[in-house]
Amino acid sequence: MSAKKRRKAPTRGKAVERVTTGQIIIYAILTIGAVIMSLPIVYMISTAFKPATELLLYPPRFLVRMPTTKNFSDLALAMGSTDTPFIRYMFNSAFVSTVVVIGTIVISTLAAYPLAKHNFPGRNLIFQVIISALMISSHVTMIPRYLVIRNTGWIDTYYALIIPALAGSYGLFLMKQFIEPIPNEMLESAKMDGASEWKIFTNIILPLVKPAWATLSIFTFISTWNDFFTPLIMTKSDAMKTLPLAMRTISDGLTIARMGAAAAGSFLTTIPVILVFIFFQRYVVETMTYSGMKG
């Protein structure tokens, strides 16, 4: 008798989740949307491994049938025709993107904390300026940015690629929205226990905003890594070119028969972005939900 009770006990209290027709429709729509959005990436990867015979077919084939790595060899040959090695372009993109991500996280977190948790004169005005800055494209301010960079003597240096990127307002807005819902009672209790402002910031705020850091890292890394226009304007020598700019320059000199090399270059350029997103994507939904932001 006791054995039967033990066998039946785990089944008590179990709630059977029913999937409604509406949920099935939503899942179906999301699945179809995900498949459609992934098609360009699949086509790019497929094109990177297509031989010349398949590249010149009309109508073109979506998937490769006879994969080859010759496109990567052609890309290496085209890169070898320049005085700057391929690894230099990779280093420039990786270095600039990493520094911008770290700098954006540090500056945005430090600035967002007093803006979200302290009342001081001009607080609302500053936030309104931040909101207004989000509406202005970076291309609109390219000419004044170029003049400032030129007058400081930073043209064709890493400073020209890093410093302007740190002045973005999106990171500050995201961190402010994430910090603001943190209960003030928690901070007041820490103050009553004798915690200083810096200790509250490092021991309470920083551990709670790590999901926001991950989200900000994704957006900042992708935008910086894929930035083509800023290096085009701010750099002159091949040694300072980032990978997207270098690939664009090399692709312009390729013939139609070598467009597979351009696809191979696009594939190599996209790999770091995909890896960063896969590594941090689980934090994105948490950040958007907690901060009250929706894309």
Image (tube, helix red, strand yellow):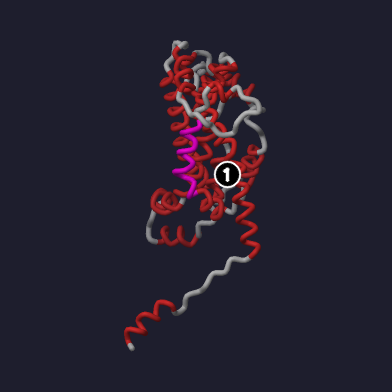
Is 281 covered by the magenta stretch?
yes
Which of the 4 image quadrants contains residue 69? top left
Residue at image position (56%, 21%) is 259
Amino acid at circle 1: Phe
Q: Is residue 180 visible?
A: yes
On screen, residue 91 versus residue 289, left or right, reads: left
Is 58 covered by the magenta stretch?
no
Span shown in magenta:
270-283
Q: Is residue 197 visible?
A: no
Which of the 4 image quadrants contains residue 122? top right
Residue at image position (46%, 45%) is 280
84 above or below 227?
above
User: Overall secondary structure of the magenta stretch?
Assistant: helix
Given residues 172 and 290, the one toward you in this image is 290
Q: Position of residue 33 (x, y in %)?
A: 62, 47
Mark 1 lies on residue: 173
Q: Say which element carries label 1.
A: helix
Q: Position of residue 175 (x, y in %)?
A: 52, 46
Residue at image position (52%, 31%) is 65
